[in-house]
Image (spheres, rainbow, N blue to C red):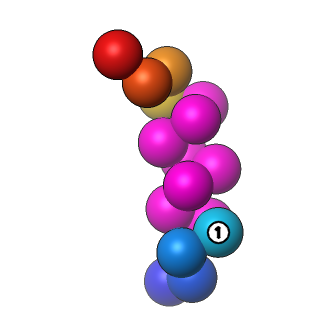
Amino acid sequence: VTEELLWELFVQAGPV
């Protein structure tokens, strides 16, 4: 898993 993919998922989840 690439860092970019993790970041996209994090952004989609909605950073608190």
Q: Is residue 4 above or below residue 15?
A: below
Of all residues, the one furthest to the top in this rendering is 16
Q: Nearer the viewer, residue 1 or 7?
A: 7
User: Dot 1: what SS?
Assistant: helix
Question: Would residue 6 be counted in the magenta stretch?
Answer: yes
Percent across and percent down for residue 11 are 58, 35
Task: Categorize mark 1 by other alpha carbons within 10 Å: few (<14), some (14-19), many (20+).
Answer: few
Q: Main secondary structure of the magenta part?
A: helix
Query: In the visual, does 3 lie left or right of 5?
Result: left
Of all residues, the one furthest to the bottom in this rendering is 1
Residue at 48%, 42% in the rendered image: 10
Percent across and percent down for residue 7 are 56, 55
Question: What residue did someone put label 1 on?
Answer: 4
Read off the magenta span. 5-12
Percent across and percent down for residue 16 are 35, 16
Q: Is residue 13 above or below residue 16?
A: below
Q: Is residue 11 above or below residue 8?
A: above
Residue at 43%, 24% in the rendered image: 15
Of all residues, the one furthest to the left in this rendering is 16
Q: Indicate the quadrant where residue 2 lies.
A: bottom right
Q: Exactly how many numbered labels are in the figure?
A: 1
Amino acid type at circle 1 is Glu
